[in-house]
Image (cartoon, rainbow, N blue to C red):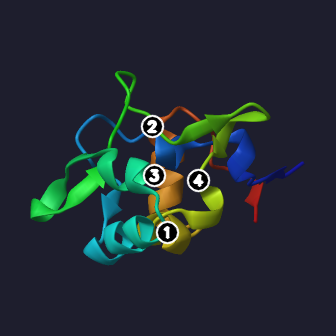
């Protein structure tokens, strides 16, 4: 029996470590500030390649991960960053994050 790949039962891509791996393009910071969401634009840390990344908790999870309805849901989902919007479920990077998190990757369907 195949397991359906469901982001809300996973969240591995949002638990990538404490080093700013979920990058935020400058346009996203501008967009959030224009929306009056300085709280999002300021919840950042230094990221890879000299860019800015989403801030993380001590356990390596993104500060925006988790809602009252799901520990794996994003509480800024509707206005999430470009990196998050463009991340593809089932991509090699997705499967690598799942593997690193100890989640089985065999028998998945999208």
The percent position of residue 24, horizontal first and vertical second, equals: 32, 64
Label 1, residues with CA under 10 Å away: few <14, some 14-19, many ≥20? few
Circle 2: element type: loop
The percent position of residue 61, horizontal first and vertical second, equals: 44, 34
Q: Which of marks 2 and 3 is in front?
A: 2
Q: Residue 76 carries which label?
A: 4
Does the residue at mark 2 contact the one at mark 3 (Cβ under 8 Å)?
A: no
Disc on the earlier residue, 4 or 1: 1
Residue in the image at 44% along x and 40% along y: 62
Say whether residue 70 is left or right of residue 103: right
Disc on the earlier residue, 2 or 3: 2
Does the residue at mark 2 contact the one at mark 1 (Cβ under 8 Å)?
A: no
Residue in the image at 31% along x and 49% along y: 42
Residue in the image at 67% along x and 50% along y: 106
Disc on the earlier residue, 2 or 1: 1
Measured Cα–Cα span from mark 1 to mark 3 = 34 Å
Residue at mark 1: 35
Q: How many discs mark residues in the rendered view? A: 4
Disc on the earlier residue, 3 or 4: 4
Residue at mark 2: 63
Say whether residue 85 is left or right of residue 1: left
Position of 89 relative to 56 (above/below): below
Residue at mark 3: 96
The percent position of residue 78, horizontal first and vertical second, equals: 65, 64
């Amino acid at each position: 029996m195949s397991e359906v790949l469901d982001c809300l039962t996973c969240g591995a891509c949002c638990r990538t470590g404490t080093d700013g791996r979920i990058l935020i393009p400058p346009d996203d910071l501008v967009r959030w500030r224009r929306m009056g969401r300085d709280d999002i634009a300021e919840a950042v840390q230094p990221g890879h390649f000299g860019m800015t990344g989403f801030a993380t908790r001590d356990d390596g999870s993104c500060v925006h991960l988790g809602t009252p309805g799901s520990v794996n849901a994003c509480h800024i989902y509707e206005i999430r960053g470009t990196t998050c919007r463009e991340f593809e479920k089932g991509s090699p990077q997705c499967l690598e994050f799942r593997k690193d998190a100890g989640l089985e990757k065999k028998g998945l369907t999208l």
